[in-house]
Amino acid sequence: MDPREAILARLLEVAASVDTSLAKRRNETDVSSSNLPAVILFDGEEVARETDPAGRTAATLRHIDMTPEVQFRLEAKAEDVGMKLNVLRAKLIKAVLNDATLLGLVINGRAIRYQGSMTATERGRSMEGGIGVAFTFTYLLKPDDVA
């Protein structure tokens, strides 16, 4: 099994468990207000570390840093949206950094790092707000095992 997909699938489940009233989506960029509130996982990018041993072959194991982003999107009263987003952010950080399944998918059972968050708000009939929360997961890519 591809560790990238295993991590992403589990991350979406963990993010959705933070608030089960949110619609669960993956890589969906056009979310209308009728589909809110939602939690959206964006697969993000991954980069192979350059610390590989000399003389490696194409099939040598590689350390991969993958940085997906979880977005919470809400439609709420203007005075409530920021607070609600911050509560979701805090719950997500705790859930991800303590999830035994995610920890079991990364190097040494501890290679998950919170990278930060960014908020965005828009005014329409009501205030719409979102927060993107990024994590980096470092896993071991075994080219011969990826199907």
Image: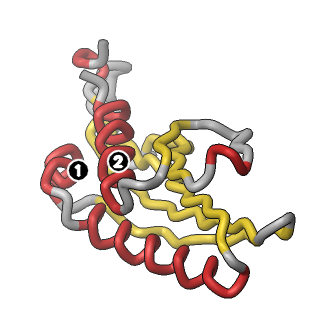
Please name the residue shown 34% across and 62% down the image.
18
Q: Residue 125's x, y, as percent?
A: 84, 65
- Identify whether 18 is placed above or below 66: below
Label 2, label 1: how far apart the Cα atoms are: 7 Å
* Residue 47 appears in the figure: no
Looking at the image, is mark 2 or mark 1 nearer the viewer?
2
Q: Circles 2 and 1: CB distance less than 8 Å?
A: yes
Q: How crowded is mark 2: few (under 14 residues within 10 Å), some or many (20 or more)?
A: many
Q: Residue 127's x, y, as percent?
A: 76, 71
Of residues 113 and 97, which is closer to you in this image? 97
Q: Residue 75's x, y, as percent?
A: 66, 64
- Residue that mark 2 sits on: 11
Quadrant in which the C terminus is drawn: top left
* Residue 114 appears in the figure: yes
- Identify whether 30 is placed above or below 89: above
Q: Residues within 10 Å of mark 1 (few under 14, many from 20)?
A: many
Of residues 134 and 33, which is closer to you in this image? 33
Please name the residue shown 45% across and 41% down the image.
48
Q: Is residue 61 left or right of residue 68?
A: left
Amino acid, disc 2: Leu
Secondary structure found at label 2: helix
Of residues 112 and 29, which is closer to you in this image? 29
Amino acid, disc 1: Leu
- Return the residue found at the far top: 147
Secondary structure found at label 1: helix
Please name the residue shown 70% across and 40% down the image.
29
Q: Residue 51 carries which label?
A: none
Q: Quadrant of residue 109?
A: bottom left
